[in-house]
Image (cartoon, rainbow, N blue to C red):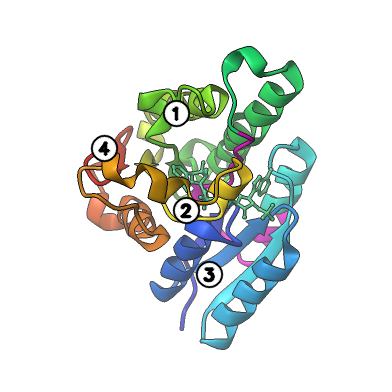
């Protein structure tokens, strides 16, 4: 298969990122799975994709760190070629608590991992994709959250605010690069069955809250991946600066 299209999926080792990496590979993309710490699952997924005829590399990089983001994109330039799509997906949650219990260290950790990381990866993608810089154009899909709308009271307002920042980044950047061949959109998943909720201290969170979801169930990573792919492919060619909610009606 000709793998001339190249995608980076940050945080691609598990959850929504892993489902996205598999789907892009299915559609013929060469895939870079970025991960921070869990090398076993990221490497296993890359091996699975490669052994089924795809082209995939797993690259360790903490995307909250500028130097590591630059190394990630340089590695993709060298090993896979011209970047076509960036999926900004890596994100973290911390233990549920009210704002009056949060300290600055916690808040800054959320903001650097969920916001600074997306800005840095967007910057590196724009440098490579923008016709202003001699690029061929491209697409950025940011993974935001329903939390940007709900605010996540009593659980993690810091996380919700970080996703609000991603909505604003998506809008501003989409307008900044609209004439330069780059589309920028985001998906806003609701409650999705992934391991992220364990990091928030409640592995069964989706099941606890599903009765509040009009469709009465949580979503699957694969359902989010399909929306990310649609926003990245030519079928959404006139869409930029938009938010696609995937929340079962929530
Ligand atoms: P997940 O299963 O916890 O996966 C998150 C991935 O991000 C992990 O593989 C982790 O890598 C990676 N990561 C975290 N910080 C990183 C960093 N600084 N550098 C590189 N990689 C980093 O979470 P998920 O549920 O699939 O979430 C994916 C995205 O969807 C996140 O942005 C999340 O906020 C968003 N989202 C999720 C839900 C939901 O209900 N699950 C709802 C709305 C939005 P390591 O494992 O290697 O550390």
Q: What segment carries the magenta color?
A: 74-95
In the displayed structure image, the side of residue 108 where residue 209 appears, left or right: left
Q: Residue furthest right?
A: 67
Q: CA distance from mark 3 to mark 4?
A: 34 Å
Give the mark nearer the N terminus: 2 vs 1.
2
Query: Residue 119 placed where, x, y %?
Result: 58, 32
Q: Quadrant of residue 8?
A: bottom right
Q: Which residue does the image show at 66% across and 66% down from the upper left?
A: 42
* Residue that label 1 marks: 173
Return the mark for residue 243.
Answer: none
Is 184 placed above or below 235 here? above
| Total marks placed | 4
Question: Residue 110 magenta-drawn?
Answer: no
Query: Residue 123 placed where, x, y %?
Result: 59, 35
Local crowd size for mark 4, using a 10 Å CA cut-off: few (<14), some (14–19), many (≥20): some
* Residue that label 2 marks: 85
Question: Residue 81 magenta-drawn?
Answer: yes
Local crowd size for mark 3, using a 10 Å CA cut-off: few (<14), some (14–19), many (≥20): many
Label 3, secondary structure: give it.
Answer: strand
Check whether the beta carbons of the residues at disc 3 and disc 1 lie within 8 A of each other: no
| Mark 1 residue's CB less than 8 Å from ligand 1 | no
Label 1, secondary structure: give it.
Answer: helix
Q: CA distance from mark 4 to mark 2?
A: 28 Å
* Residue that label 3 marks: 30
Give the mark nearer the N terminus: 1 vs 4.
1
Give the mark nearer the N terminus: 2 vs 3.
3
Is 157 placed above or below 187 here? above
Residue 83 visible in the current orientation: no
Local crowd size for mark 2, using a 10 Å CA cut-off: few (<14), some (14–19), many (≥20): many
- Closer to us: 182 or 250: 250
């Amino acid at each position: 298969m000709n793998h001339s299209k190249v995608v980076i999926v940050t945080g691609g080792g598990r959850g929504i990122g892993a489902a996205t990496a598999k789907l892009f590979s299915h559609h013929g993309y060469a895939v870079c799975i970025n991960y921070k710490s869990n090398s076993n699952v990221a490497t296993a997924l890359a091996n699975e994709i490669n052994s089924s005829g795809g082209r995939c590399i797993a690259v360790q990089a903490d995307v909250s760190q500028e130097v590591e983001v630059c190394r990630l994109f340089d590695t993709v330039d060298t090993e896979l070629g011209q970047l076509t799509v960036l999926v900004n997906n890596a994100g973290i949650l911390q233990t549920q608590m009210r704002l009056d219990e949060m300290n600055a260290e916690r808040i800054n950790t959320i903001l650097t991992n969920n916001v600074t990381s997306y800005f840095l990866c967007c910057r590196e993608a724009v440098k490579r994709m923008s016709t202003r810089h001699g690029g061929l154009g491209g697409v950025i899909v940011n993974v935001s959250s329903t939390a940007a709308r709900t605010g996540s009271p009593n659980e993690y307002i810091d996380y919700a605010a970080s996703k609000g920042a991603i909505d604003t980044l998506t809008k501003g950047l989409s307008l900044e690069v609209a004439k330069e061949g780059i589309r920028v959109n985001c998906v806003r998943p609701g409650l999705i069955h992934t391991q992220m909720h364990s990091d928030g201290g409640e592995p069964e969170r989706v099941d606890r809250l599903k009765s509040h979801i009009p469709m009465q169930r949580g979503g699957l990573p694969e359902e989010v991946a399909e929306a990310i792919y649609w926003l990245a492919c030519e079928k959404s060619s006139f869409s930029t600066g938009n938010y696609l909610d995937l929340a079962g009606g929530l």
